[in-house]
Amino acid sequence: MFSYDWIALFITLLGTMFLIGELLVNMRGFFALIGFGFITVYFSSYLATDMFIVMMLVYFLGIVLVVIDGKLINDGTLATIGGVTMIIAVGFSAPNWVAGMYSVIGVILGGAASLLFLKVFKRRQMWTKMTLNDQLSSEMGYNSMKETYQFLKGKIGKARTDMRPVGTIQIEGEDYSAVSNGQWISRNDKIEVVSVDGTRILVKKIEDN
């Protein structure tokens, strides 16, 4: 067990920072190894062998949910659940509420600090789907990014992909990257362009009468 409760803050901060950092940028497993070491030290310092295994699994379940969100869902829901799962794992593993508070703060700060790696290293490919800043090539069937898409406002088209909320729409035979107005729109649903802000196209689903 740590001599001082506040040490838990730095252990969970560094562990989470490097583990999440490995998901954000490609460090060939180096960050993951460092993060795993810190988290192992944290859980092994507070827990017996059986609970150590359980809480490690719970913590890494949170990591897995973040990965699934980045690769498949791309709407942040599973990533949020994963973050909460990680917080629960470290919080309930602490021997007292003070150490638990420090541990939870460490996870939150570590997750935030991992974003700094994006300033230095190249972003992993799986996270590019979560933004509308991708440069979509004509070879992939997309229009080149234009300065404005104001002419699309009010036009009717269909969703080429599921929109949760980001996806691809088709209007008059051309494909565009767009975002829904809070709706989950399924592929082939009829849509209307509500507004355009530069290259950001906002659409809504048109309900069939």
Image (cartoon, grey):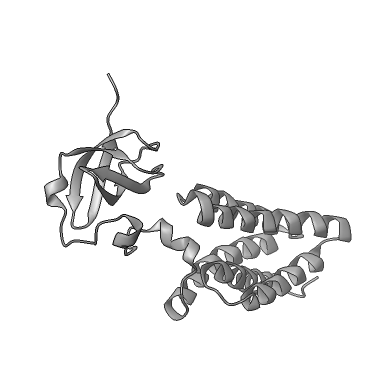
Q: Residue furthest top?
A: 209
Residue 5 rendering spot, x and y as whole percentages: 70, 69
* Quadrant assignment, res 30: bottom right
Q: Residue at x 57, y 53 (%)?
A: 68
Decide which of 170, 148 is in the foreground and name it.
170
Q: Is residue 201 shown above or below 105?
A: above
Q: Vertical placement of 50 versus 32: above or below?
A: above
Mark yes or no: residue 29 visible. yes
Q: Is residue 29 above or below residue 191?
A: below
Residue drawn at 52 percent across, 68 percent down: 24
Q: Quadrant of the N terminus?
A: bottom right
Residue 97 in view of the camera: no
Image-based side of 145 in relation to 122, left or right: left
Outermost residue toward the left in this view: 151
**Quadrant (top left/top right/bottom left/bottom right) for the C terminus:** top left
Residue sticking out furthest to the front:
139
Asked if residue 70 lies left or right of residue 167, the reply is right
Give left or right: position of 183 versus 17. Answer: left
Along the line of sight, which residue is nearer the eye, 158 or 2?
Answer: 158
Which residue is at 22% across, 57% downward?
A: 199
Query: Whole-percent x and y of residue 98?
Result: 67, 62
Q: Is residue 48 above or below residue 80?
A: below
Residue 89: quadrant of the picture: bottom right
Q: Position of residue 23 (x, y in %)?
A: 56, 66
Q: Is residue 100 left or right of residue 136?
A: right
Residue at 61% over, 70% down: 13
Quarter of the figure with residue 137: bottom left
User: Of residues 118 and 92, which is closer to you in this image?
Assistant: 118
